[in-house]
Structure formats: structure tokens, C-alpha cells
Image: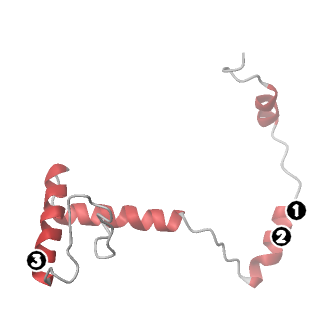
Amino acid sequence: MCTPTLPLARCAPTLVLRQGLTGRNERSAEERALLEAASSGSRTSLSDLIRRKALEAAEMEVLERNIVTIQAKDWEAFESWVRRPPKVVPARRKLARRIPTWQA
């Protein structure tokens, strides 16, 4: 079951929360039990597990961003960089002429 209250185990199949019937304390105990099981399974402390998973989630959040913001003062420099002809790199040309090993 996916719940927004479980960012580290969004879709943990072993955790069942009965909405409306489960009190806050019971839900917290179930969440903690799940987190402790995960931490013992990964042979790390609970705080280290939560920190590591939070950092992984933050990293994925940053990597999945699709919008790039360029300040107006930097826009002209960016446009000139984009429109510049590519640098000639002899090693890159040589590599482009080679037949890949899987096609040889």
C-alpha cells in the first residue's frame, strides 16, 4: 500500500494501514517496526538507514528535475556558448571513424 506518510517505504507490501481504524500510536509502532527491520537487514543503525535513504531520495529528486533556470544576466553568454561551433578534437574524429567491436 502506498502512503504519503511512509517516504522510505512508499509501497511496502508488508505494512497495512487501516485508515480510520488505526490510531496514531499503532501506526507509528508499525512504521518503526518496518524501519527497524530494514535497518537490521542492512546491518546498519536506524538513524544511518534513515539518513542514507533520505539522501538517496534527495539525490533522485535533484536528478529528476527537468527545468533549468538561467538568470537574465547570464542568458547572452549561454546563447553564445550554444551557438558556437564545436571544438575540433582529433581523438574524437578518430574514434568516430572506428568500427565498434560488436560490429567487427
Question: What's the residue at 13%, 83% (across, down)?
Answer: 23
Q: Nearer the viewer, mark 3 or mark 1?
A: 3
Disc 1, SS: helix
Look at discs 3 and 2 and give the one toward the viewer.
3
For label 3, the SS is helix
Image location of residue 82, percent across then percent down: 82, 63
Q: Are marks 2 and 1 in contact (CB under 8 Å)?
A: yes
Q: Residue at x 83, y 70 (%)?
A: 79
| Residue at the disc numbered 3 | 26
The amino acid beneath tag 2 is Glu
Count of numbered marks: 3
Location of residue 59 in the rendering, given as x and y in whole percent from the top left corner: 44, 63
Q: Residue at x 20, y 64 (%)?
A: 15
**Does 45 sit above or below residue 77?**
above
Identify which residue, 66 or 88, lies in the foreground: 66
Quarter of the image for residue 29 reads bottom left
Based on the displayed image, in which of its 4 quarters is residue 27 positioned? bottom left
Per the image, the residue denoted by label 2 is 79
Task: Specify few, some or many for label 3: CA neighbours under 10 Å numbering under 14, 14-19, or 20 or more.
Answer: few
In the rendered structure, which amino acid carries the disc numbered 1?
Answer: Arg
Q: Earlier in the sequence, mark 3 or mark 2?
A: 3
Which quarter of the image is occupied by the N terminus?
A: bottom left
Marking on residue 83? 1
Say which mark, if any, is on residue 41.
none
Instruction: Give how far apart the Cα atoms at labels 2 and 1 are.
Output: 6 Å
Image point (13%, 53%), residue name: 40
Crowding at mark 1 (Cα within 10 Å: few <14, some 14-19, many 20+): few
